[in-house]
Image (cartoon, rainbow, N blue to C red):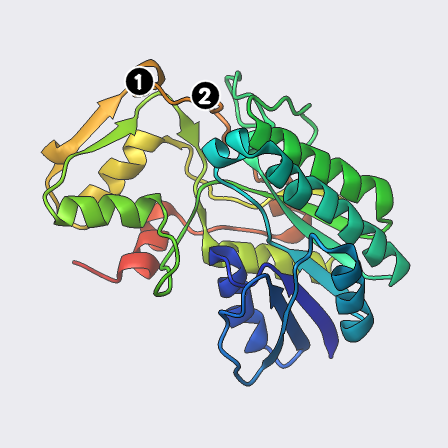
Amino acid sequence: MKKLLIVGANGFTGRRLLTDFASDPSYQVTVCSLNPDIAPSQGYEFIQTDIRDTAALRQLFETVCPEVVVNTSALSVPDYCENHRAEADLLNTRAVEQMAQLCEAFHARLIHLSTDFVFDGNTDRLYTEDDIPLPVNYYGLTKLAGEKAVARHCSDYAIVRVVIIYGKSLPLQHGNIFQLVAHKLRNGETIRVVSDQWRTPTFVGDISVGIERLIAVPVNGIFHICGKDHISIAEIAYRVTDYLRLDRSLIRPVTTAEMRETTPRPRDSGLSIEKARRILGYEPRSIEEGMKETFGCTH
């Protein structure tokens, strides 16, 4: 039985990992988060921890003695990170560096979640793991610094880049773009969506699959674990609308310039999954398959 520690388990991705791994008898699962909002249950142990507190983080490692650590924690809202830089740096970079050092000291494998926002998006093809990152906002800068800290301090690690994570959220969790579109259109509200930014959206369950493969195949390096559909954000909204048979006329496609976002975003941060396919046998769901698991079968 492998000792697994999931950091940030109260988040959207963390909760899915908790659900998937806690039901697997191969793992002894411990989860942590800043707030005590994870209900005790069989299959895992919960330890409330502020990972920004160096002493508390070390105490967590001494208590659990993990063999594998999966870090899903992050400040991931670009606008918030832009306006709260010290806070973003503390969680996305400094805490990650401390975690990486502890993983090395405790001989634990670190699987760290990162983002497509480490790239500037000025490309005409999908990014590979060998492409040079160049963030356009502070969120991307802090996540890239976290990646570098992991690679610098760990001899056993994987960096997992994901893109626009979606799926069925639990009560009180923040929704994702798929559920936001569905909610607004069901209420008859119009929604403005960017038509000239492209992504490779990731179904949350596929992240669990990718991480499980990275535990079983302990190779070092960066892996893109995301979806196989390379589409615009406006097209995401249209796909949801069509799947749920809602009113397409409520979608208002606008350009990045027309959206007037205060924080810049990459134009096209779609990620190639060919490395994960080749080394891990990773094969993600299509958006249609992901929507079926998110919304249920509507046909």
In this view, 225 is above or below 212:
above
Q: Quadrant of residue 298?
A: bottom left
Residue found 38% across the figure and 53% down from its top: 174
Is 153 placed left or right of 165 in the picture? right
Q: Residue at x 55, y 60 (%)?
A: 208
Q: Position of residue 252 (x, y in %)?
A: 19, 27
Residue 64 quadrant: bottom right
Extreme residue in the right direction? 105
Gap between marks 2 and 1 measured at Cα: 10 Å
Q: Amino acid at mark 1?
A: Thr
Tell me whether the residue at label 2 lies in contact with that at label 1, contact meaning CB atoms closer than 8 angstroms. Answer: no
Which residue is tagged 2?
A: 267
The answer to whether any part of residue 271 appears in the image is: no
Q: Amino acid at mark 2?
A: Arg
Residue 45 appears in the rendering: yes
Q: Secondary structure at mark 2?
A: loop
- Left or right of 69: which side holds 102? right
Q: How many marks?
A: 2
Label 1 Cα crowd, 10 Å radius (few <14 / some 14-19 / many 20+)? some
**Image-based side of 114 in relation to 201, left or right:** right
Q: Earlier in the sequence, mark 2 or mark 1?
A: 1
Which residue sits furthest bottom? 42
Q: Nearer the viewer, residue 23 or 51?
A: 51
Drawn side of residue 51 relative to residue 55, left or right: left
Q: Residue at x 66, y 64 (%)?
A: 49
Within-10-Å neighbours for mark 2: few <14, some 14–19, many 20+: some
The residue lying toward the viewer, choosing from 235 and 82, is: 82
Residue drawn 37% across the image and 53% down it: 290
Check disc 1 and report the residue beneath it.
Answer: 255
Residue 170 in the image: state x and y as whole percent: 37, 64
